Image (cartoon, coloured by chain):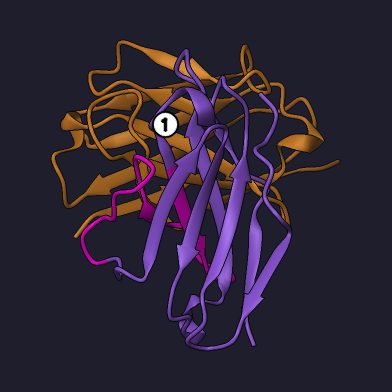
Amino acid sequence: EVQLVASGGAVVQPGGSLRLSCAASGFTFNDYVMHWVRQAPGEGLEWISLISWGGGSTYYADSVKGRFTISRDNNKNSLYLQMNSLRAEDTALYYCVKGRTSSTTSCFDYWGQGTLVTVSS
Amino acid sequence: QSALTQPPSASGSPGQSVTISCTGTSSDVGGYEYVSWYQQHAGKAPKLMIYEVTKRPSGVPDRFSGSKSGNTASLTVSGLQAEDEADYYCSSYAGSNDYVFGTGTKVTVL
């Protein structure tokens, strides 16, 4: 059974930093691309970042480019999101999401339960 | 990238069909066969229902079907059941390793 357990969400002040982690199990982690997708309270879904299966290629939505960094450790079956210069509009539930294949055109086939990030003074 | 356009709500009685549209542009929906649909029950994580426009993952009932014409994709739920009441989101690959989601549609089973 695929499991994606995200952690690290917290209340942080504007301008602050946070690192999210996601522990993956139930599949061969290094065979798949991974994504982070977020959902602001009461709002829709927003794709924010993608990392290739090997970790060598990373991609970002314009809304987080230059502030967020996605990474992975295939030895630890873990995905990360380093979030810097946080803004109020970054407040959201952050989902760790498995890609359906190893291709960067792959859709999102398994979603974790999410971890809540609140940016507020 | 602008969000794909979905109707805010849709409804139907049990046993009826409901179709949700998802309108984008030639740079996303119209340009790729990579449209997918997600079901999200209240307080839960989204679940993949349709991928690559028409394909159903294992375990998704065949009451769910997808299609696309030009820049508009559609999800049809046939034989509506109470458990189909949820929010539904479309998504499309938008080129250059970018993705876009729809605005979401709340489906109510009357």
B54 relative to A65, above or below: below
Residue at the image position 13 percent from the left and 39 percent from the top: A28
A36 versus B110 height, above or below: above
Q: Where is residue A76 in the image (x, y as percent from the top left)?
A: 21, 34
Chain A: what color? orange
Q: Residues within 10 Å of mark 1 (few under 14, many from 20)?
A: many
Q: Where is residue A92 in the image (x, y as percent from the top left)?
A: 66, 46
Q: Is residue B45 visible?
A: no
Looking at the image, which is closer to me, A100 or B67? B67
Image quarter where the N terminus of chain A lies is: bottom left
Residue A52, x across and y down, in percent: 31, 20
> Looking at the image, which residue sits at the far right?
A121
Give above or below for A65 relative to B36: above
Name the residue carrying label 1. A80
Horizontal arrangement in the rendering, residue A34 relative to residue A16 (left or right): left
Q: Does the magenta stretch include residue A27?
A: no
Q: Is residue B56 magenta?
A: yes
Looking at the picture, does residue A37 appear above or below residue B9? above
Q: Give the structural element (helix, strand or loop) at label 1.
A: strand
Quadrant of the rendered structure where residue B59 is? bottom left
What is the chief secondary structure element of the magenta stretch? Answer: loop
Magenta range: B36-59
Chain letter belonging to callout 1: A
Per the rendering, the colour in which chain B appears is purple
**Measuring 37% from the left and 38% from the top, which residue is drawn there?**
A107
Front one among B101 and B77: B77
